[in-house]
Image (cartoon, helix red, strand yellow):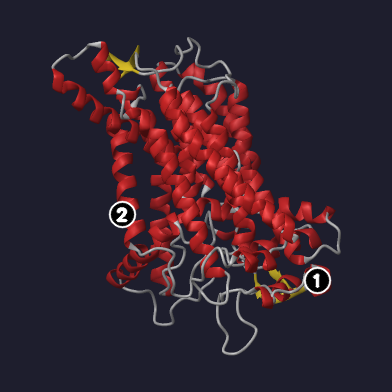
């Protein structure tokens, strides 16, 4: 039944929520979040040593393969490029002297002088005998990078070319805080919650680490954020054909990038079904839904092709089957449990490319953060009607993550049982739907803070008074500040932890002392590397100031708004 509740807003709700609202009027904190996220990823593009990020050599090799041959072989058929394998040997991924050390600390004295850094063409030609694992994915991301490589000078140093690839990822992901803010605004949030939604993207350092690396996840994650915005538009009554068209085309891009796009596309279809039920009219929804499906098929054909050729949607697995046959169910689940408990939270929050038995943080920290995030998400699901957001909308927003988790569990179980190796346990696989998940978390946190304020205001027995109304929202004003401070501090500390481990005379050196080593290994000229570092510091300060100013964005008096419980 309809219920009228007091919801604090900074402007009247527009009568036609289908009307395009653009980017005008967004809070300062949104742009501060965008700037800091971009500056952070740019810093990671030189602070995360080349090829230490997950699967980066494979993706670089795939891009060079596309540049060279302009083709995409089938599963387990694409070889690695000899030039990329040669560059890996001199990248610092492993020491060049015995005993060989994986991921050694990089000191300035070991860095190759910039004038002596060769191009990929000088490092080798042709292919190697090793199979490139990236060949199991669609070619979208590699085709993008390979096309860029086509126009680069052949003499460009190999590490600078990889850095350019990294910056393409940065450009793709820079608008993520903006997408989060637009989703929150579409849901009718006030300026504080909109600011918090944008700042929430900063709360997961590993998202920016991956964003500053060469990985096809980045094109998928960028597309996923905009698909989420389109999904929310549909759920809130936007049945325009142009909306269906752009969401379908973005979905096609996602489908040509990675299999984790499939849950995203399925949820868009579900959103149209939910909207049809709400409108009690299939006729209004059927045309835009068909437009969406047809547009998405520009990328969806890839997966139909896989079923026809390989007999499965996503062929995967580069480990040989066990000679003794599949593992027992109990043994399989035991291996999976150990792997998920030991690495999944860390890989989701802050792996920072720190491996070889080391950890950026004790395992209990990402575990606690995961529990807190889950609790806030449950609060968002339970309390969302208090902020004027229908509970069914929240369910649809978190559904892509739940589907991704379910598919991941099934995939890991199947591969573990077959090969005895619990591979593919990657927290970053949840990033394709991370933006709507974070928006729901912000809704949950804002609702919880509102309850705290209500409890305090209720002590004076003057429910309904202006004083109580103002007090009720005192704590809720802090949501953007809390999220922003957490995100900036966690990011800065993580950056310091990574620099101290990757650079210096030894692991865990003083990060400030290691900045010179970082600059020596950077693919950029020394002065430009310093500019990147300064921009990071300035953007962090700007983000903190904007988060603090957001406390003033919410008026004391609330505007009654009719919402659906």
Is residue 141 visible from the viewing direction of this image? no
Q: Is residue 371 left or right of residue 227?
A: left
Give me the residue at 79% from left, 59% from top.
Answer: 67
Q: Which residue bears the numbered disc 1?
A: 118
Query: Where, by quadrant of the figure, is residue 214 drawn?
Result: bottom right
Give me the residue at 53% from left, 42% from top.
Answer: 541
Mark 1 crowd level (few <14, some 14–19, many ≥20, 10 Å Cα): some
Tell which of 390 and 213 is nearer to you.
213
Query: Where, by quadrant of the figure, is residue 133 drawn?
Result: bottom right
Give me the residue at 72% from left, 70% from top.
Answer: 84
Where's residue 156, x and y in %? 82, 62
Of the numbered discs 2 and 1, the one sitting upstream in the chain is 1
Q: Secondary structure at mark 1?
A: loop
Where's residue 309, x and y in %? 61, 58
Which label number is shown at residue 368?
2
How far separated are the C-alphas under marks 2 and 1?
45 Å
Tell which of 513 and 439 is nearer to you.
513
Q: Is residue 381 left or right of residue 251?
A: left
Q: Are marks 2 and 1 in contact (CB under 8 Å)?
A: no
Is residue 115 visible from the viewing direction of this image? yes
Tell which of 521 and 248 is nearer to you.
521
Mark 2 crowd level (few <14, some 14–19, many ≥20, 10 Å Cα): few
Where's residue 223, x and y in %? 58, 41
Q: Is residue 521 left or right of residue 481?
A: right
Q: Is residue 381 above or below residue 532?
A: above
Where's residue 169, x and y in %? 64, 50
Can you say which quadrant of the picture contains the N terminus?
top left
Which label number is shown at residue 303?
none
Q: Is residue 10 above or below residue 480?
A: above
């Amino acid at each position: 039944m309809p219920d009228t509740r007091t919801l604090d807003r900074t402007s009247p709700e527009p009568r036609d929520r289908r009307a395009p609202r653009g980017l005008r009027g967004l809070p300062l904190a949104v742009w501060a979040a965008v700037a800091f996220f971009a500056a952070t990823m740019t810093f990671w593009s030189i602070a995360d040593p080349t090829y230490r990020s997950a699967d980066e050599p494979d993706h670089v090799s795939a891009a060079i393969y596309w540049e060279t041959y302009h083709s995409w072989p089938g599963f387990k058929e694409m070889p690695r490029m000899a030039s990329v394998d040669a560059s890996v040997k001199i990248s610092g991924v492993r020491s060049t002297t015995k005993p060989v050390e994986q991921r050694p600390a990089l000191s300035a004295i070991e860095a190759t002088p910039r004038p002596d850094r060769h191009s990929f063409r000088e490092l080798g030609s042709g292919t190697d005998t090793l199979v490139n694992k990236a060949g199991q994915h669609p070619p979208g991301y590699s085709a993008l990078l390979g096309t860029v490589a086509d126009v680069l000078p052949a003499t460009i140093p190999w590490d600078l070319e990889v850095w350019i690839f990294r910056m393409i990822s940065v450009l793709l992901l820079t608008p993520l805080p903006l997408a989060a803010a637009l989703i929150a605004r579409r849901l009718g949030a006030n300026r504080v919650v909109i600011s918090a939604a944008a700042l929430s993207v900063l709360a997961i350092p590993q998202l920016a680490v991956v964003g500053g690396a060469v990985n096809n996840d980045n094109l998928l994650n960028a597309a996923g954020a905009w698909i989420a915005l389109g999904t929310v538009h549909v759920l809130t009554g936007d049945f325009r054909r142009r909306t269906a068209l752009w969401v379908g085309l973005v979905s096609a891009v996602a489908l040509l990038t990675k299999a984790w796009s499939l849950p995203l596309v399925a949820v868009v279809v579900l959103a149209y079904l939910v909207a049809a039920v709400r409108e009690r009219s299939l006729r209004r929804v059927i045309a835009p839904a068909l437009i969406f499906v047809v547009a998405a098929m520009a990328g969806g054909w890839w997966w139909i092709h896989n079923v026809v050729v390989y007999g499965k949607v996503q062929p995967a697995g580069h480990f040989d089957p066990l000679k003794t046959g599949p593992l027992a169910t109990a043994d399989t689940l035991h291996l999976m449990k150990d792997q998920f408990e030991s690495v999944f939270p860390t890989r989701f929050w802050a792996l920072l490319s720190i491996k070889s038995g080391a950890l950026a943080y004790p395992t209990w920290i990402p575990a606690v953060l995961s529990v807190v995030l889950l609790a806030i998400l449950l609060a968002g699901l339970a309390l969302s009607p208090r902020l004027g957001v229908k509970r069914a909308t929240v369910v649809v927003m978190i559904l892509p993550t739940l589907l991704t988790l379910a598919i991941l569990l099934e995939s890991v179980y199947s591969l573990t049982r077959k090969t005895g190796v619990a591979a593919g346990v990657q927290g970053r696989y949840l990033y394709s739907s991370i933006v709507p998940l974070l928006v729901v978390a912000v809704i949950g946190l804002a609702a919880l803070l509102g309850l705290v304020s209500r409890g305090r205001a209720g002590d004076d027995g003057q429910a309904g008074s202006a004083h109580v109304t103002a007090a009720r929202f005192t704590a809720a004003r802090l949501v953007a500040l809390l999220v922003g401070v957490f995100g900036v501090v966690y990011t800065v500390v993580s950056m310091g932890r990574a620099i101290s481990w990757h650079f210096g005379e030894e692991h865990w050196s003083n990060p400030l002392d290691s900045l010179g080593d970082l600059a020596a290994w950077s693919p950029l000229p020394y002065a430009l590397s310093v500019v990147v570092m300064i921009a990071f510091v300035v953007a962090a300060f700007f983000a903190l100031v904007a988060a603090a100013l957001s406390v003033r964005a919410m008026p004391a008096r609330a505007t009654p708004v009719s919402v659906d419980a």
